Image (tube, rainbow, N blue to C red):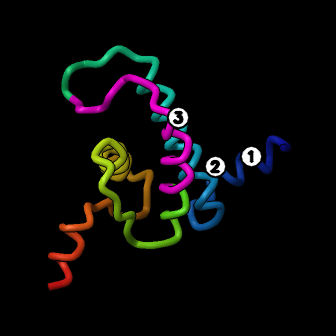
Amino acid sequence: LSKSKFKKIINDGSRYKYIRTFMNLAAFMLLRHNLPSDGTTDFSSRIHKNDFNDMVIAAQASYVDFLITEDKTLISICKELKKRDVLSFKTIQIENFINSLI
């Protein structure tokens, strides 16, 4: 991957949504596992066998408006990244999503 192509992927928010979302989730999870907790977040610092699968699923949500899940850790991570204007979708639990439709 050339340096110019890499810069294009990083800087173009309208394209490469999956790659950008996956990279941000991967970076966040890497930091989460390697930095000491400050006690203000509810993120588990343990590596979980499903972390990679969570990143793949959440990255696919970059093409829709909502990621609907019951995984509280994934919801917390996505909400944190959404606050930082890194993710384009809203993460919500199934019950809350259904209630929002009623």
Q: Is 93 rendered above or below residue 75?
A: below
Name the amino acid type tagged 2.
Ile
Q: Nearer the viewer, residue 94 or 80?
A: 94
Estimate how packed mark 2 is, as few (under 14), some (14 to 19) or many (20 or more) residues with alpha carbons within 10 Å.
some
Q: Is 95 rendered above or below residue 26?
A: below
Residue 27, label in figure? 3
Residue drawn at the location 30% of the way across and 55% of the way down: 70
Q: Nearer the viewer, residue 81 or 32?
A: 32
Name the quarter where the N terminus is drawn. Answer: top right
Label 1 belongs to which residue?
6
Q: Position of residue 24 (x, y in %)?
A: 52, 43
Name the amino acid type tagged 1.
Phe
Kindly indicate whether the residue at mark 1 contacts the one at mark 2 (C-beta within 8 angstroms): yes
Gap in Å between the C-alphas at discs 2 and 1?
Answer: 6 Å
Mark 3 vs mark 2: give the one in front.
3
Q: Is 24 rendered above or below residue 82?
A: above
Q: Secondary structure at mark 3?
A: helix
Q: Secondary structure at mark 1?
A: helix
Name the amino acid type tagged 3.
Ala
Q: Nearer the viewer, residue 88 or 34?
A: 34
Q: Is residue 6 magenta?
A: no
Gap in Å between the C-alphas at discs 3 and 1?
Answer: 16 Å
Q: Position of residue 79 (x, y in %)?
A: 30, 50
Which residues, given as a range, are shown in magenta?
41-58
Q: Is residue 56 magenta?
A: yes
Estimate how packed mark 3 is, as few (under 14), some (14 to 19) or many (20 or more) residues with alpha carbons within 10 Å.
few
Residue 10, label in figure? 2
Gap in Å between the C-alphas at discs 3 and 2?
Answer: 13 Å
